[in-house]
Image: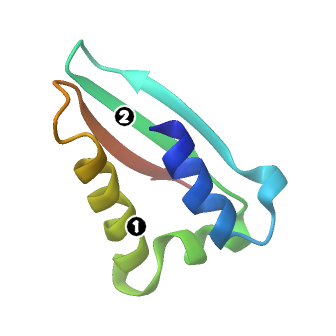
Amino acid sequence: MQDLIRHIALSLVANPDEVEIREESQDDENITIILRVAQEDLGKVIGKQGRTARAMRSLLSAATQEQTVQYRLEIAE
């Protein structure tokens, strides 16, 4: 799932070298993917009224629908 988020983020940002993704596991069923980008790219990743971030979360949800693990996307500032 990290690769999916990385691919989307790299296509949006102007500074691809500063894209950082890591996973944090709360328990066996919940994993949070934390996306960190350069400050000037934050608006591109979030999008107007959060539409881009919402779309990324929807894709993540659809990609993991048949898995027992639930993924959550968090965009860090």
Of labels 2 and 1, earlier in sequence is 2
Which of 47 and 58 lies nearest the eye of the viewer? Answer: 58
- Name the residue: 47% across, 80% down: 47
Rendered image quadrant of residue 33: top left
> Position of 11 compared to 8: left or right?
right
> Position of 74 compared to 41: left or right?
left
> Position of 4 compared to 19: left or right?
left
**Where 8 falls versus 48 (above or below)?**
above
Residue marked by disc 2: 32
> Position of 66 compared to 47: left or right?
left
Counting from the top left corner in percent of width and height, residue 17 is at 83, 52
Counting from the top left corner in percent of width and height, residue 49 is at 35, 84
Residue marked by disc 1: 53
Q: Secondary structure at mark 2?
A: strand
Rendered image quadrant of residue 16: bottom right
**Where 40 falls versus 34 (above or below)?**
below
